[in-house]
Image (cartoon, grey):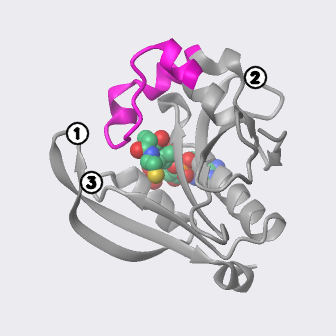
């Protein structure tokens, strides 16, 4: 993966590294963290494979999920991670999903990371539309998407077979024109 680096007031978003695997496994396997996530590592080895897959293609490669590390500036410890995916042809849209380790939640860090990511996607990478999909029962994630100013575009009823049951799916989005108006 390219050596992408997004710097915000407190954070640096950049590549996940092989030595992040035990830490990634630790917080991504916590029940409260993986409740609404499709990917749920069962071992540090699975987390290592996930990191290797994420590093094998450049950030711009369409239709591949790229996972970025979220770290506090000047520190190596993973605070969380954010996945980005460029679907379609031309790949001018981006989808993301964000996760913070429980001890770093409630400090505004996810909001800060997402605003940095949105600015990077719209300003540096000239994307047209950025969107995210979330289970309506996932209150903190819904609140986060609304806090960063994303619009609720759709509520699909029982559209995903998820962990043994049908789940609803909310889609939130933002256009480059809306981002520029806000700036
Ligand atoms: C979704 C998730 C990242 C949101 O994290 P979060 O910590 O709630 O979000 P933020 O970092 O924006 O923090 C907001 C909270 O910090 C508080 N806060 C404290 N200091 C702050 C500051 N300096 N700036 C802004 N907010 C601050 C806010 O008041 C808010 O508190 P509240 O939730 O009590 O209202 C987190 O819940 C998570 O990792 N969930 C599991 C993974 C998941 O399901 N992801 C879904 C993929 S889309």
Q: Give the position of the C terminus as an image quadrant.
A: bottom right
Q: Nearer the viewer, residue 146 or 176?
A: 176
State which tag comes first along the sequence, 2 or 3. Answer: 2
Marks 1 and 3, how far apart at CA: 14 Å
- In this rendering, is residue 37 above or below 143? above
Residue 18 place in picture, x, y as percent: 69, 19
Q: Specify the segment rendered in magenta.
A: 22-49
Q: Nearer the viewer, mark 1 or mark 3?
A: 1
> Which type of secondary structure does the marked residue at label 3 adopt?
loop
* Label 1 beta carbon within 8 A of ligand 1: no
Q: Nearer the viewer, mark 2 or mark 1?
A: 1
State which tag comes first along the sequence, 2 or 1. Answer: 2
Q: Give the position of the N terminus as an image quadrant.
A: top right
**Quadrant of res 171:** bottom left
Q: Residues within 10 Å of mark 3 (few under 14, many from 20)?
A: few
What residue sits right under mark 3 in the picture? 137
**Quadrant of res 137:** bottom left
- In this rendering, is residue 113 above or below 49? below
Q: Nearer the viewer, residue 109 or 53?
A: 53
Mark number, residue 182: none
* Label 3 beta carbon within 8 A of ligand 1: no
What residue sits right under mark 2 in the picture? 76
What residue sits right under mark 1 in the picture? 163
**Quadrant of res 118:** bottom right
Left or right of residue 29, residue 85 in this image: right
């Amino acid at each position: 993966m390219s050596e992408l680096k997004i710097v915000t007031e407190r954070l640096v978003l950049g590549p996940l590294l092989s030595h992040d695997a035990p830490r990634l496994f630790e917080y991504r396997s916590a029940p409260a963290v993986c409740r609404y996530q499709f990917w749920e590592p069962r071992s540090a080895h699975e987390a290592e494979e996930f990191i290797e897959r994420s590093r094998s293609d450049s950030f711009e490669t369409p239709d591949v999920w790229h996972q970025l590390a979220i770290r506090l500036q000047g520190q190596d410890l993973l605070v969380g991670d954010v996945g980005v995916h460029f679907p379609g042809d031309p790949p001018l849209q981006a989808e993301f999903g964000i996760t913070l380790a429980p001890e770093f939640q409630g400090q505004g860090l996810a909001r800060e990371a997402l605003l940095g990511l949105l600015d990077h996607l719209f300003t540096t990478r000239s994307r047209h539309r950025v969107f995210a999909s979330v289970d309506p029962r996932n209150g903190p994630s819904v609140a986060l998407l609304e806090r960063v100013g994303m619009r609720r575009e759709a509520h699909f009823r029982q559209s995903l077979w998820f962990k043994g049951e049908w789940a609803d799916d909310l889609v939130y989005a933002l256009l480059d024109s809306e981002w520029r108006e806000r700036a």
